[in-house]
Image (tube, rainbow, N blue to C red):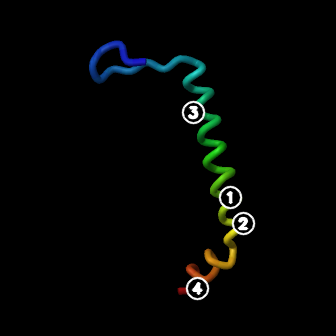
Amino acid sequence: MATEEGAETTSPIDDVMEDIRRELVRRVAANDRDANRDVYDALEDE
């Protein structure tokens, strides 16, 4: 929530939501790497 232009304060729920978003991104990236392992391995070998 912005209280002044350029100044932001975060609430505890904002911190929790950011942690959840970060974990979801981490899990999606890990699942994508696992699902496309052959592509990642081929790119690594180039």
Q: Determine whether label 3 and label 1 are within 8 Å by CB.
A: no
Instruction: Indicate the secondary structure of the residue bearing disc 1.
Output: helix
Up-down: is 12 above or below 36?
above
Disc marking residue 14? none
Q: Determine whether label 4 and label 1 are within 8 Å by CB.
A: no
Q: Which is more N-terminal, label 2 or label 4?
A: 2
Q: Which residue occupies 58% across, 85% down?
A: 45
Instruction: Indicate the secondary structure of the residue bearing disc 4.
Output: helix
Q: Quarter holding the N terminus?
A: top left
The amino acid marked with disc number 1 is: Ala
Q: Which residue is mark 1?
A: 30
The amino acid marked with disc number 3 is: Glu
* Image coords of residue 8 (percent x, y): 38, 21
Up-down: is 41 above or below 30?
below
Q: Which is more N-terminal, label 2 or label 3?
A: 3
Q: Which residue is mark 3?
A: 18
Q: Which residue is mark 2?
A: 34
Up-down: is 40 above or below 25?
below
Q: Which residue occupies 29% across, 23% down?
A: 6
How many numbered circles does the render carry? 4
Q: CA distance from mark 1 to mark 2?
A: 6 Å
The amino acid marked with disc number 4 is: Asp
Q: Which residue is mark 4?
A: 45
Question: Closer to the observer: label 4 or label 2?
Answer: 2
Q: Which is more N-terminal, label 3 or label 4?
A: 3
Q: CA distance from mark 3 to mark 1?
A: 18 Å
Image-based side of 33 in relation to 5, left or right: right
* Image coords of residue 33 (percent x, y): 66, 65
